[in-house]
């Protein structure tokens, strides 16, 4: 969680360091969760991030990601990933944050982009 100068929360990151273990939980709500499971050994951690639109472009998201990367590195996790749309605006943001591995697939007619970062 990241708070602005006013004390209000302006961003958060939530994740798991073991996507394979979380698979059973997420498959109930997201049938596409396991489409990239063959990559979970190399990039086992994943996260969801949200930053208030007014705070975007101020490095809040990058600071949240770096704090999570530090946590994962301390736990000797070999990699982390996010899944987004290949056409989403956040693709460049993740690229700037060293998510260099990319793999595209389609699930239920929806294009998905897996972006991984080795640690």
Image (cartoon, rainbow, N blue to C red):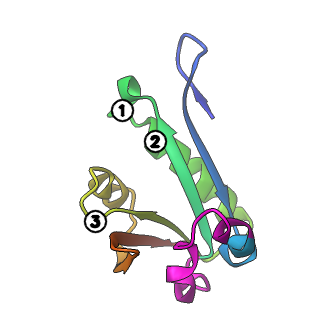
Residue at the image point whose x is 44% and y is 29% from the top = 52
Q: Residues within 10 Å of mark 3 (few under 14, many from 20)?
A: some
User: Where on the picture, by quarter, is residue 92?
Assistant: bottom left
Answer whether residue 7 is visible to the viewer in this image.
Answer: yes
Q: Which residues are magenta?
A: 25-43
Q: Is residue 24 magenta?
A: no
Q: Pick the residue in front: 62 or 18.
A: 18
Under circle 3, the secondary element is loop
Q: Is residue 30 magenta?
A: yes
Which tag, 1 or 2, sits closer to the chain's start? 1
User: Where on the picture, by quarter, is residue 2?
Assistant: top right
Mark carried by residue 22 = none
* Residue 24 pos. (x, y %): 73, 74
Query: Which residue has dot 1 on it?
Result: 56
Q: Quadrant of the C terminus?
A: bottom right
Residue at the image point whose x is 59% and y is 45% from the top = 13
Residue 99 horizontal side relative to residue 73, left or right: left
Residue 117 horizontal side relative to residue 3, left or right: left
C-alpha separation, residue under disc 1 versus residue under disc 2: 8 Å
Query: Which residue has dot 2 on it?
Result: 61
Residue at the image point whose x is 36% and y is 70% from the top = 113
Label 3–label 2 contact, CB within 8 A: no
Tell me the mark number nearer the camera, choosing from 1 and 3.
Answer: 3
Mark carried by residue 86 = 3
Which tag, 3 or 2, sits closer to the chain's start? 2
Q: Residues within 10 Å of mark 2 (few under 14, many from 20)?
A: many
User: Where on the picture, by quarter, is residue 78?
Assistant: bottom right
Q: Pick the residue in front: 59 or 38.
A: 38
């Amino acid at each position: 969680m990241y708070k602005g100068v006013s004390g209000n929360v302006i961003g958060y990151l939530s994740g798991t360091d073991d996507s394979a273990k979380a698979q059973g939980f997420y498959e109930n709500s997201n049938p596409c969760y396991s489409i990239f499971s063959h990559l979970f050994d190399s990039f086992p951690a994943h996260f969801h991030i949200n930053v208030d639109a007014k705070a975007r472009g101020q490095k809040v998201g990058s600071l949240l990601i770096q704090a999570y990367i530090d946590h994962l590195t301390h736990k000797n996790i070999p990699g982390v990933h996010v899944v987004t749309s290949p056409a989403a605006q956040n693709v460049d943001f993740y690229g700037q944050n060293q998510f260099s591995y990319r793999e595209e697939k389609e699930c239920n007619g929806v294009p998905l982009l897996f972006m991984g970062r080795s640690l």
